[in-house]
Amino acid sequence: MMKLMGWVIAAAAAFMAPNAMAAATETVEPTADTAAETAVAVDTGTEIEGAYMPLTPEPAVGIPDGRMGLQDQYTDIGQQAADFHNNWLLVLCVVISIFVLALLGYAMIRFRRSANPEPSRTSHNTMIEVIWTVVPVLILVAIAVPSIKLINAQYNAPPADVTVKVIGNQWYWTYEYPDHGVDLVSNMLKEQDDPTLAEGARYRTDADGPALLAVDERIVIPAGKTVKFLVTSADVIHAFAVPAFWTKMDAVPGRINETWVKVDRPGVYFGMCSELCGARHGYMPVAVEVVPEEQFNAWVASKGGSLPGVELAAEDAESEADAIEAGDEAGAEEAAEAAVEA
């Protein structure tokens, strides 16, 4: 009976092995095709289904446009923080300012010299002292409770779908995708009439973004996915900031700080180095491009990277075939399960 069951397991594993190998191959082969299609699409400017095409920035989306107040927020954390600022802190500041102004006006009129030739000799009032001690404490508590909730949400990130290591340099950024095998060096694009622009070098166009914010290599992340940023520096202190995400994290040499975003709306969002880091501090822009997941996968392929799990699935399928050939029924079954899970 046991021998019969062994033959059944071996037969099932033999049937599943080609399927697992095919699945792994199907996942890998389109990656190369997609990379070629992406290169053609980017070079010619034509849209090809399944190929990555750089997005064009939209007016007033992720771009400073001179308006009063905060930029529109495109993350849940950012919207929560903006609401806290606009609907609570700002209102509280206005109420306190009006109250203090009213007290000053009352004191100036009620206790002016002409109305009080004999000034009051009052030197102590217990009720007033209790009020001006208790009320500020209550105001601080009212500010602290939502602040702590916001901080808790910012620093308790869900599991990351994509990890990006951000490295500040004097004066440019480098980005690494450790799970995808992609490394980028990002520099600000110069204007066409810039005398320092090298002959034949790429210059900024409106499709790249505003002057002083457009870059030659954007951070590309998938929409609707949790992206963790590991922020550090290679030289001095920088700061990685994208206002539309409510993100600002110091990049400190020898230390890794973490922040995260989850952006549902595709688009291009701009930021900058927000720490005075030297003579060209103002020339370290950040551009984050949020694209649908299939576009992100095509972008990874175009940069020579790979998707996590593809190589693992191929290795599991190969292990399964080797186990079947060697007559290792338990090993074949384990490898088959691993290939299916991958």
Image (tube, rainbow, N blue to C red):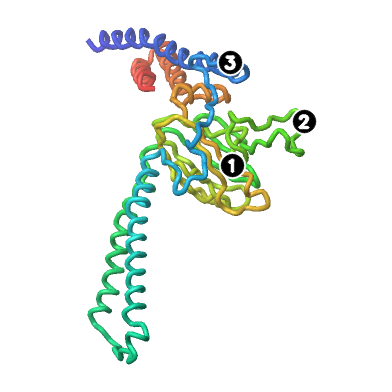
**Label 1, label 2: how far apart the Cα atoms are:** 23 Å
Mark 1 or mark 3, earlier in chain: 3
Q: Which circle's residue, 2 or 3, is located before the other in the chain?
A: 3
Task: Looking at the picture, tell me which residue is in the foreground, 116 or 2.
Answer: 116
The residue beneath circle 2 is: 199
Q: Is residue 86 visible?
A: yes
**Could you say which disc has been placed on residue 36 in the image?**
3
- Give the camera-side residue of 129 and 341: 129
Is 91 placed above or below 134 here? above
Provide the residue designation for mark 1: 285
Give the mark, 1 or 2, whose residue is nearer the N terminus: 2
Residue 151 visible (yes or no)? no
| Callout 2 crowding tier (Cα within 10 Å): few <14, some 14–19, many ≥20 | few
Residue 194, picture quadrant: top right
Q: Locate residue 281, reporting x and y percent.
A: 63, 49
Where's residue 74, x and y in %?
41, 38
Q: Amino acid at mark 1?
A: Pro
**Mark 3 crowd level (few <14, some 14–19, many ≥20, 10 Å Cα):** some
Mark 1 falls on what kind of element? strand
The x and y percentages for residue 104 are 36, 74
Q: Amino acid at mark 2?
A: Glu
Q: Residue furthest front?
A: 114
Type of residue at label 3? Ala
Q: Residue 294's spot in the image, x, y percent? A: 45, 21
Looking at the image, is mark 1 or mark 3 nearer the viewer? 1
Give the quadrant of the N terminus. top left
- 124 relative position to 279: left or right: left
- Say which residue appears at 24% left-offset and 82% top-offset: 126
